[in-house]
Amino acid sequence: MKRTAVIFIEKATPSTITQFHDILSTHVLAIQEKWSFELKTFRSSIKNLPPSDTKVLYSLQLTHRDNQTVVIKNQSAIVTGQHSTDALTSNGCSSGFPEPFDNILTSKLSNIWTQRQSTKGNFGTTYKTSELIIRASNVFSSSGFKGLLLEIECTDPVSAEEFDRRVANIRAMLSEIDINDYKLNKDEMNEGKPVFLCDLAYQYVKVLD
Amino acid sequence: MVQQLSLYSVIDEGSFDLLIATISALSGRSPVLFANYNHVAHPNPNYAIEKVNAKNQLVEQTRVQLMQEIPFEKLQTEEYSYKLCTKMTGDGPPIETEYLNSLMRSCGDGTRPWSLSLWDIPSAGKDRKVCTQAVVESVVTSTGGAHSSILSFLAELGYVPGYQFVQLGTQFYLENGIVFQISKLWALHGESGKTSAVTKDGFLIKAYLNVPKATDLESINQGTAHLQQLKRELRDYLELSIPDRKSMDSRVGHLNDF
């Protein structure tokens, strides 16, 4: 089972990523692909929504996960892909040309859902160390620089404790460059029932929102 | 947005074998079996939903269609070929309704991908040669969260279940990308397990092809020409025609409401 955690450093400057690069560089085995993400926030425009209902819906697209999009609302999430399956197309279910779900939200469902914000990280760097894959990107919104985001992934089948230890190493490096104030999340959306991509998106939402 | 170009017809049950023979001879291809489950959801009627979005553009409430293939091992038959179609004369499909009713709630590892689509009303115009309908589609590959099912997600989105049906039939992949479907439809009436045949004593015929982009006029014109050609070839035998576009309107609150 893959484990992930997401860190967001709001108090970073645009050059913190360089400092992080320098301190991490002695551990890096390889620098891998560039990556990007976009988190969109939508608000319900239903006037008489019960007060108990959540009004916000998130969609997160990740280029390094085959451009898949995760949509989260309250306790439910879906993953939409860039490709259809043979079983769907050959049984007359799919046209074979699917789009990310946020395209539908901003077009056909824009009477129910209004896009409020877009938070992006473009051309981030991917570092592979002996223990982890770390993706770092500066984060921007329409109002400008927001901070530094780190996505930490462990592809080895390790225990939660071992994963925590590896994440602690990263935290130690952050504290070496005087970064101690940040949000970290490694929760599962449904505790005890991991669903990889949904959980990762949930972690993005928790630290960025 | 994908454009689907299509023509429709119907035949009675007695004509099935001859149609299969005709299309086989015409195309040199073999018929293959296909089956799908359809769930149509509509916006929650308790919600006050405006007809315009935040940019003041008109956006009408539209139904959402969810489709998933039915694996052949779920068909209650010994015959996995087009011949199955001649035996489907009853009020129900040869598939357990319990299984069908569980699909929308299924979660976890057993979940197979869903196609989620929203259809426009077919294009208007007197001189239409084929039915042209725009569709936007997403493929949902998995669900997550404490309420992990496509049904829970639709509820969060603001949609409630509408109606369900099953389509089972046989299809040919013709030249030029045309799919020629001969199928039966059954409506499912919820948890009661009741079903009824929509295409009693007959089959629905649909010949269609998909053009990935609405702006690709050349492909649309070519596809239209290919469907016209098919229509001409079958002229003396089958009348492929354009249905009333209002009957294919998936917007809520129009004349077609049930």
Image (tube, coloured by chain):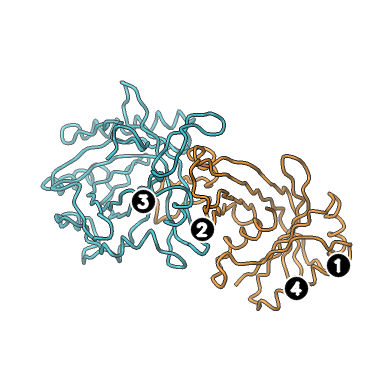
Task: Name the image quarter holding residue A149.
Answer: bottom right
**Residue hosting label 4:** A166
**Residue hosting label 2:** A76
What element does badge 4 sit on? helix
Look at discs 2 and 4 and give the one toward the viewer. 2
Q: Is residue B130 left or right of residue A63?
A: left
The crowd level at tag 3 (other Cα within 10 Å; few <14, some 14-19, many 20+) is some
Tell me the kind of residue under disc 4.
Arg
**Residue hosting label 1:** A26
Distance between the Cα atoms at labels 2 and 4? Answer: 30 Å
The crowd level at tag 4 (other Cα within 10 Å; few <14, some 14-19, many 20+) is some
Tell me the kind of residue under disc 2.
Ser
Look at discs 1 and 4 and give the one toward the viewer. 4
Discs 3 and 4 lie in a common subunit: no
Look at discs 3 and 1 and give the one toward the viewer. 3
Task: Name the image quarter holding residue A16.
Answer: bottom right
Q: Which mark is residue B161?
A: 3
Point out residue A182 in the picture as x, y percentages from the top left corner: 78, 60
Look at discs 3 and 4 and give the one toward the viewer. 3
Tell me the kind of residue under disc 3.
Pro
Chain identifier for the cyan-coloured part of the image: B
Distance between the Cα atoms at labels 3 and 1? Answer: 56 Å
Point out residue B208 in the picture as x, y percentages from the top left corner: 33, 39
Distance between the Cα atoms at labels 1 and 4? Answer: 15 Å
First in sequence, mark 1 or 4: give its number.
1
Discs 1 and 2 lie in a common subunit: yes
Residue at 77% x, 63% y is A30
Of the chain colours in the picture, the one used for chain A is orange
Label 3 marks a residue whose chain is B
